[in-house]
Amino acid sequence: MKLMRIGPVGAERPALLDASGTPRDLTGVVPDIDGALLADAAALERIRAAAASGELPALPAGRRRRVGPPLRGIGKIVCVGLNYHDHARETGAAVPAEPILFLKAPDTVVGPDDPVLVPRGAEKTDWEVELAVVIGRTARYLRTAEEALDHVAGYAVSHDVSERAFQLERGGQWDKGKNCETFNPLGPWLVTADEVPDPQALRLRLSVNGVVRQDGTTADQIFPVAEVVRYISRFMTLHPGDVINTGTPAGVAMGRPDPKPYLRPGDVVELEVEGLGRQRQEFTAA
């Protein structure tokens, strides 16, 4: 299933994208798409049954103007740094022996086509297309890859926007360059895990002003999805509705020759992950 949320900020309606590409209204079936829903097998079956019935109403055209994040009430976003071999090479970094983890605040999440704000004082705003993993069952101390994947509810496109000067040149941890307002567009859909048989066989692409900057595959991940979920569960409890950003392939501005093409107000970024949908953002001054 492709689950989504459509409507103005703070008033999104739960929806399902059918095989024809038409958003179908789920408000008569479930109250919203959140961690509680993903953990409720009976609620998910109600959605599947409603979809199979062919009776879900199409959302009126006026309700399709904005696609919101496909998930409400995210508890935490756990991010993995340097998780692609080609990205480590382009930045001159050693391949990590264990996943590099940092947290991103849930209030950075916006819709897939919402504007992204270039922060005041920013110098090096960068792009990062990523595969997002959405947790569907509480995960603690997972032992195997199979057990880890059994706790995944689905997948989505994530844009882990970064301000590199804040991240790397202002002291402390990476948080200052990762948690600026609007720095995590998510969606357009949450694609349930049964529709993604192999998360290590997905192509990721990103372009800036029509120029392709990233073109990679999750097959190049240093730590695959199952290992990332298993590993994180050894250090923190993952709850339904938590999101994991699993890293970005080569092609970021930071890895390019000088002068590096960092983002500026007016730039347009488009990105996609195979089978999970596309995003488009215009960058504007905060």
Image: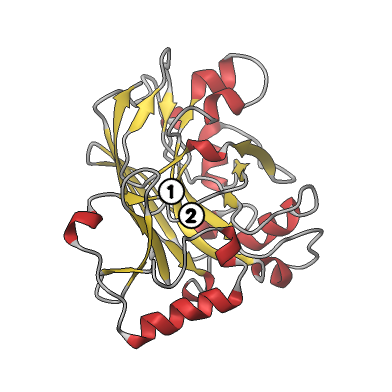
Type of amino acid under label 1: Leu
* Left or right, 3 with reference to 193: left
Is residue 254 positioned above or below 77 on the image? above
* Left or right, 137 with reference to 23: right
Q: Residue at x 45, y 34 (%)?
A: 183
Is residue 264 positioned above or below 113 on the image? above
Q: Residue at x 55, y 46 (%)?
A: 247
- Identify the residue under disc 1: 186
- Identify the residue under disc 2: 71
In which quadrant will I find the C terminus? Answer: top left
First-in-chain label (2 vs 1): 2
Assign a secondary structure to mark 2: loop
**Cβ–Cβ under 8 Å for marks 2 and 1:** yes
Of 285 and 91, nearer the camera is 285
What is the C-alpha distance between the residues marked 2 and 1? 9 Å
In which quadrant will I find the N terminus? Answer: bottom left
Q: Position of residue 231 (x, y in %)?
A: 74, 54
Residue 76 in which image quadrant: top right
Is residue 64 positioned above or below 260 on the image? below
Residue 51 in which image quadrant: bottom left
Type of amino acid under label 2: Leu
Residue 273 in view (yes/no): no
Q: Which mark is residue 261?
A: none
Q: Residues within 10 Å of mark 2 (few under 14, many from 20)?
A: many
* Left or right, 4 with reference to 160: left
Q: Residue at x 54, y 30 (%)?
A: 178
Q: Position of residue 148 (x, y in %)?
A: 70, 65
Of 61 and 285, nearer the camera is 61
Q: Residues within 10 Å of mark 1 (few under 14, many from 20)?
A: many
Assign a secondary structure to mark 1: loop
Residue 87 in view (yes/no): yes
